[in-house]
Image (cartoon, helix red, strand yellow):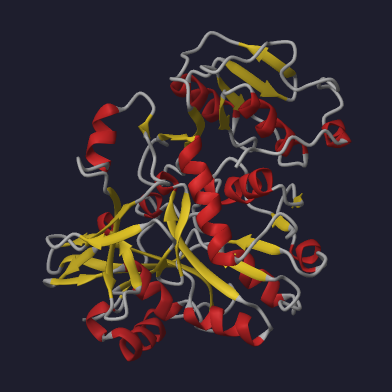
Amino acid sequence: MRPSTPRASTRTVWASLSEVGWFEHVGLRPEDVVAVALPPGAGWRDIVAEAWEAGAAVFPVDHRMPPAQAGSLLERARPTVVLDAAGTHRVTGVEDEPGVALIVHTSGTGGAPKLVRFDRRAIDAAVASSALALDATGGDPWVCCLPLAHVGGLLVLLRAVLLGAPVRVHPRFDAAVVASEPPGAFVSLVPTMLVRLLDRGADLSRPRAILVGGAHLSPTIREEAERAGALVIETYGLTESCGGVVYDGRPLPGTEVRIDGEGGGIQLRGPTMMLGYRFDEAATAAALTKEGWLRSGDAGEIDAEGRLRVVGRIDDAITTGGERVWPDEVEAALRDHPKVAEVAVRGRLDREWGQRVVAWVVPADPAEPPTLEELRSRAAARIGRHKAPRELVLVEALPRTFSGKVRRAALAAGVPGSAGPE
């Protein structure tokens, strides 16, 4: 498949930029790395197509980043061309090998963002396998309301580019606007967005399908969405796998999944996997086995029917009193408590237990927050008392990355909360 090259007037979104061509004045080369630091808009489709026509690699940069953070990322990535609100300009950078089509930075929940490299074969495979699973064609519209600097939103755009499909790119997620989209489109969301659509009472039968990924989807929320008419597909994947490669527990065509027998880690292999990390051979060697398996960093199980169940990040596991507890499991048990708006769980060092389970909670009503014992009772009834939180921290908001993921490491910087009995 080759990218379509629409030449519509969508470039007028940024009137200061060239109307003739995004890169006409810099003369792109196949070894170029093009950093694109623009707000989401229809023009992105043309930008990607034009860069790929020249054989260059596209490197999306989140336009919402503070200048210092964006500058640090660009300094690490060292692109050769930058496209931003001021225009297109060539800079002193480091070229990449011909054939690299895309560089995507990770969310950085575990530290500095990594720079993930893909060739066109991986992108083509990601689009083709998803289209096959969804029975999507060039005539099926897509709605993109996720950040284009991250793989979830970017893959929506790339499906449209490669399939020749129509796509509506939203500058930000607005539940009212998304709910009013014409019927029949594929929509990709994170769980928080789905909850906001439900809270508005949106008619979720309008989209052809709603793909939900990026974080754990509560079964309760999924059931509520399905009652509202939605066809929900829960996706699993990483930036390094070029987005979702497992739909509702089933690997997409061409993708293999296995569980590491020693640590229970999920490993993935297939044509969509990354080439490696830019400027980080050590991290690449740690992530990819010699046989081409990608170590996801997630723990999971495969049931008797071959379905994958993700239980959590390996590094997030809490060992308390000799028992292993997964934060995702505790969060799922507490998330639908009527006094809880949002919840995140992490371990803290504990003299007696080794680690204790701590719940950071945004109350639904700050005037009447949940008590620790209320949450412990809810968790004990659902997943067992040994997994229930032993400490509660009430917060106004959870720390998140620009892609919306909770920054668990930042939770530990919060103030201690109320502790409870065993």
> Is 22 on the left-hand or right-hand side of 60?
right
Q: Give the residue at x 62% y 43%.
A: 148
Q: Residue 136 occupies which quadrant of the picture?
A: bottom right
Relative to 173, does residue 325 appear above or below in the rendering? below
Q: Residue furthest front?
A: 1
Residue 314, horizontal then vertical, whole percent: 26, 58
Q: Residue furthest top?
A: 92
Residue 394, horizontal then vertical, whole percent: 46, 67
**Residue 1 at least partly seen:** yes
Residue 370, horizontal then vertical, whole percent: 48, 80
Taking depth in this image into account, of 85 and 234 the one nearest to the observer is 234
Relative to 144, does residue 216 appear above or below in the rendering? below
Q: Residue 388 occupies which quadrant of the picture?
A: bottom left
Question: Which image quarter holds the N terminus?
Answer: top right
**Residue 365 at least partly seen:** no
Question: Which image quarter holds the C terminus?
Answer: bottom left
Relative to 300, does residue 158 appear above or below in the rendering? above
Taking depth in this image into account, of 407 and 95 the one nearest to the observer is 95
Q: Give the residue at x 58% y 59%.
A: 131
Q: Give the residue at x 58% y 34%.
A: 60
> Is 171 on the left-hand or right-hand side of 224?
right
> Is 381 on the left-hand or right-hand side of 15?
left
